[in-house]
Amino acid sequence: MDISADLLLNAIVAGLLLGGFYAAVTAGVSISFGMLDIVNIAHPAFIILGSYIAYFVNINFGIDPIVVSIMVLPAFYALGALVYQVYYLSFEKRGQESLRGLAFFFGLLFITEVSLILVFGVDYRYVEAAYIGPSIHLGLIDMPLRMLVPCLVALAMFGLLELFVTRTFLGRAIMAVSQDQLALQLMAADPIKIKRIAFGISIATASIAGALLIIIQPVEPSVGREYIGRVFAICVLGGLGSMPGTLIAALILGVVESLTATFYGPSWAPAVSFGFLLLTLAFRPAGLLGR
Amino acid sequence: MSALLHVDNISKRFGGFVALDGIDLEVQPGERLGLIGPNGSGKSTLVNCICGTLRNEGGSVSFDGHVVDKLAAHQRTHRGLARSFQLPRPFHSMSLADNLRIPLLYTVHARKGPLRSAGDLDARCHELLDMVGLLKKAKQLPRDLTQVEMRKLELARAMAAEPKLLIADESMAGLSHSEIDDILALLMRMNERGITVILIEHIMSAVMSFSQRLAVLVSGKKIADGKPEDVVQNPEVVKAYIGQ
Amino acid sequence: MNGLKFSTIAIGVGLVVMAFAAWLGLDYFYFAGYTILQYIVLATAWNILGGYCGYVNFGSAAFFAMGAYSSVALHKFDAVIDTWFPDSSIAPVLHAIFPLPIPILIVFGGIVSGIAGFGMGYLTLRLRGSFFAIATLALAVVLQTLVVNWDFVGGSRGAYIIRPEEIQFAGITINYIVYLFVLMLILAVIALATARAIERSQLGFGFATIRDDELAAEASGVPTLRLKLIATTLSGAFMGMAGAPFPYYIGYLQPASAFSLDYAVNSIAMPMIGGTTSWIGPLVGSILLGSLQQIATVTISSAVNLLIVGILLVAFVIIAPNGLVGLVQEHWRKRRRP
């Protein structure tokens, strides 16, 4: 196989940009699964929902998709809080979160996907923005803006979350609740309320991730499913609840996927992330930097 | 080596937190050992490591002459190590009698072969429930029990496995004086029949009257190990309980 | 009643169904009935691991598809015997054996998927339940990608299997679709009888402890890993057996349809709606939900019918966690207390 430096370099750069985006996609699950121990496999469905909302407003009102996603953040937060409340009352309280909680989120995933099919159909949808199209050229490297801009926004969001979790009182309360609920209660903080806020934030990130997704690639309802494996692979590989670990794992996955797609063809790409996930679970479930 | 249980310099960490820091412990066959220590000192972690629920990171555990580090928890139970859980963990979809049937089927049968008929099994379950005073509730589900009754069920389930060494982890919390005496008498009877007992408790009167030897755990380290009268006068032990 | 008596009654019920179908004289009944019977097997198989042990498998489609694709591979093998073994004495022997009859294909499918179930279990069952569930999803996608890239079975283009019109059996000519229906009926009876036998045995008792409290089960002497492996192997095997005749039923097999998420949702929704603690639950769930979907697909659209399944699943999981069987049991319990 003729591996030119040009091709290799571009594949790696594309992978890094993709990885940055993946980190944003995974940030929400890092909170819900890594810190709250809630297996929200419906998270990708919320992301796709975000994509479609960005699409709808963009196509009908011409507003930039990222701006749209920020505008609807409160709605997504409220949705997340609502979903958590139902989850808590139905499952966590009764101690049945493993079987029934999983089935619950699976059902939500399905309902969201099928509803989107019924409303929008199965055609691919795109958004329009000034930065979709042009690229920056740096020597041998081509960086399409439609990849670069989402990556930068993703890293910014990721950085904000990391600051929030380590520097603010609420953020540290969320870390605390993941480690010792009883101690938190003794400090007169309500763990349920904190978890609800955390889950709301987790779903809010899906809004932004969704806008970024539809900038990077055209979207149709079943695209979410590919992301289930990616998101959990990154989460587990990065070590649950470790934000820096998640970022590193996301970048690694992005690069490996990009190289596979470039040199072996895109039809192998889903196997990469899901294969990674299986291998990690089988051999190193604590992740790279995990506890 | 004549010790029934030999814990050799075991350690256990959870992330950055050191739960056990080089614990050495020996228990002789037929002995009654009391294990005390403040909350969070690592007593339950120690039990979990001995029984295989958790894997220790350093050192090793030997039971009945064999190193058991590589054995799964159920295999250690088959060899005669049984424990009750500090926070009761009953099988909530089954009746009390069925809860006891599990160790009978899976441990006693595994050891001795299926000698018992269904009728014998039932009789044995009822006998065990009677020993802890729960016979009347044999057909009920664990969710209908009080906390105290659940602790008794925990103890009965550990006893059902016919162990050589029984570790009773805070079985007496919340019991009345007469109930405590009943459980102590029960454990004494088992000890007289040759079963070694490790009693983990906060109720000092029970621990003092029951134990032949007392070990004290503080912050993952064993700070005392000897005759109960001597240990309670050990200045470090006093400091740990009363504070600086 | 013991297993033999139960099986006899089940077969009796099956014969009644057959007689009814023959009287109706509608081919459609056999087609629809096959689908429902297939779901009975899938739901029952899922429930052995999910309902009895408490381990959720999202990758039912993978095991089903492996059964289907092993049939396709064996079917295609028949065409290449001469190419692969040109001048040897093996070719005539192979020609005599192939193409394999469907019951043998079913056994093959069961073995392939059973081994896969064992393998997956071995890799992932030492993790806690939620990790296991995610791993099953991962496995399904990895397998689908492998099949899509495997040209021998048609890859993403799919594979055609021409279904014969009829089949000779002991001198009688039977319509092929009837033949498939009967095979699936027998498989469903076997699956139900197996699930029922497990429930009443020590094995089932052990499964329940795993579901209730795995740590306590281990401490009581239950060899949890071994039991879980038995459950995954059995569950996988039955799903593979359900999938083996599928290419013959449908005529044209594509990875997208074999690995369809519909199978995953249905094999979870049917037991959870029917009730997960007994063999009756998956049976009730698959008949109700299966029929509902057949009606919905024909009258409304197939997308709406999936939406209904999703909504029912979420509703039941929240409101009636023990399913329909659980609701009935609650009702009886309340009536018994004066």
Image (cartoon, grey):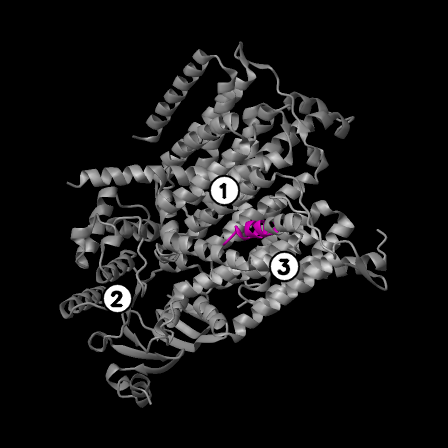
- Mark 1–mark 3 Cα distance, whole angstroms, equals 50 Å
Front residue of this view, candidates B182 and A230: A230
The amino acid type, in three-letter code, at marker 2 is Ser
Decide: is A76 above or below B168: above
Q: What crowding class fits label 1: few (fewer than 14 Cα within 10 Å), some (14-19), or many (20 or more)?
A: many
Q: In the picture provided, is A224 more to the left or to the right than B8?
A: right
Q: Secondary structure at mark 1?
A: helix
Residue C197: % across, % down: 37, 36
Q: Check whether the beta carbons of the residues at disc 2 and disc 1 lie within 8 A of each other.
A: no
Decide: is C183 above or below B40: above
Question: Was residue C303 drawn as part of the magenta stretch in this picture?
Answer: no
Residue C271: % across, % down: 42, 38
Front residue of this view, candidates A244 and A43: A43
Residue A254: % across, % down: 69, 58
Q: On what subunit does the disc labeled 3 rest?
A: A
Residue drawn where x is 27% and y is 41% of the image:
C330
